[in-house]
Amino acid sequence: MDSSDSRIRYARTDDDVSIAYWTDGEGTPFVHMSPAFPFTHLQLEWQVPGWKEWCAGLAGLGKLVRFDPRGGGLSDHNVANRSLETYVRDLEAVADHLGLERFALLGVLHSGPVAVAYAARHPERVSHLVLWCTYAKARDLSAPSYEAVRMLLEKDWQVYCETLAHVLFGWSEGEAQQFASFIPECVSQEEARRLFDVVDGFDVDALLGQVRVPTLVVQRRAFPFFDMDVARRLTAGIPDARLAVLEGGSLCPWMGDAVATAQLIGGFLLDAAAPTRQGGTGGVRTVLFTDIVGHTEMMRRLGDARGRDVLREHERITRETLKQHGGTEVKTMGDGFMASFGSVTAAMECAIALQRAFNAWNAGERAQQAAPLHVRVGLNAGEPIEEDGDLFGSTVILASRIAAKADADEILIPEPVRHLLSGKSYVYADRGETVLKGFENAVRLYEVRWRE
């Protein structure tokens, strides 16, 4: 990606504030609001570890748009008029200036309430809303770590910058120092104080029910500034919103597995945009089946009560992993799941994540006390028939048959799916051709190696 000054342009708000922005890529617009508001700087953020690679991944989803809100980076500083409403105006100015009729919108932490407010006001322009580690009411930011960092803002600017980098992003000492030197380039200490005085009043709780666009709420399980209940309430307040829980505590979407995170967002964009036609095909989908190996024997050995406890863990792990990768649960069959994806890559990443999650469970103490969970997974891609929220047809049947052929802890895919994944760095083992029940022609199957 080109990070030069030549890409930076300016839009002007209706209250005469100059807002800096840049765009990259082609296709459906994706507006990425400030990932660390108010610490934002279009020119210098390329020095932040992992940022360039993250943007490159998002630009692959469409036309990526970034802008500095008023008071930060290359936009106008020392602006007297600052409120939730004025930050919405900044976004409106950029969208109008670029002529964005419809776009996906990503809000992160303090820019999340601004994204919610815009989506509630302009549902005709927001195609998808992604909310990353954010909240509806700023008073939810009451964790001791948040209070301690805010106190440092008043007392010691340098220590505040370094501490924020450690606590909020989880970076190493070298990366933290790099970000600590970046912050003063974005805003002065006094500007940061004024900005946070405004942020402390953010409250969009009353607007959540007015958000009528497909919404994905993504939350880090160990995020330091508020607990999971904040994310759950945010998700529950927005009609039909989904919650995806990722491990770790960093605010940075690109910390951990940036590729998987970008695929999670991409899968959500594709899935939410997929057409639903009563009794017709829903377009190309990747169908995933799972099944617990030895389920009947496990239930006989443990009894109904203890066996049900283990099944609840299986359901929890599967549902959380599906949400993290943009998968849609079609139905559960007691000892297995059927899910669909708009992206074959997202489906594959989900299958691998499932096996790794069950492997981690099996290594834990609770599995030793109860029972391990060994799951087989099968995938297939095609155009299934969609009716009343369920999927039918040969694409679905073949996916089920493929899953049944897998052994414990295995992932199997047919040759056409492997071709769809060409260019990806997956490792396969050729399992040869086999004739599956109900299909005349033999199908060549491949085992996907998932162990690290």
Image (cartoon, rainbow, N blue to C red):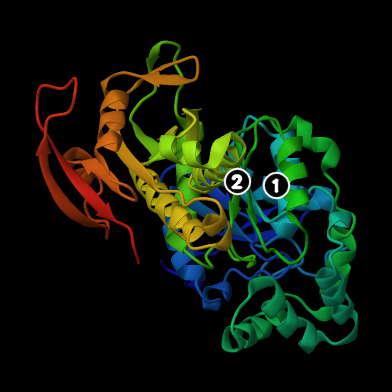
Q: Is residue 292 depicted above or below 176 in this figure?
A: above
Q: Residues within 10 Å of mark 2 (few under 14, many from 20)?
A: many
Q: Which residue is mark 2?
A: 105
Q: Residues within 10 Å of mark 1 (few under 14, many from 20)?
A: many
Observer-nearest of 223 and 110: 223
Q: Amino acid at mark 2?
A: Leu
Q: Position of residue 67 (x, y in %)?
A: 62, 59
**Would residue 252 be found to the left or right of residue 359 on screen?**
right
Residue 241: give its label: none
The answer, for residue 25, to whether it is visible in the render is: no
Q: Is residue 212 depicted above or below 265 in this figure?
A: above
Residue 115: give its label: 1
- Residue 133: image quadrant is bottom right
Name which residue lies at 68% across and 29% down.
Answer: 212
- Residue 125: image quadrant is top right
Q: Amino acid at mark 1?
A: Ala
Observer-nearest of 405 and 111: 405
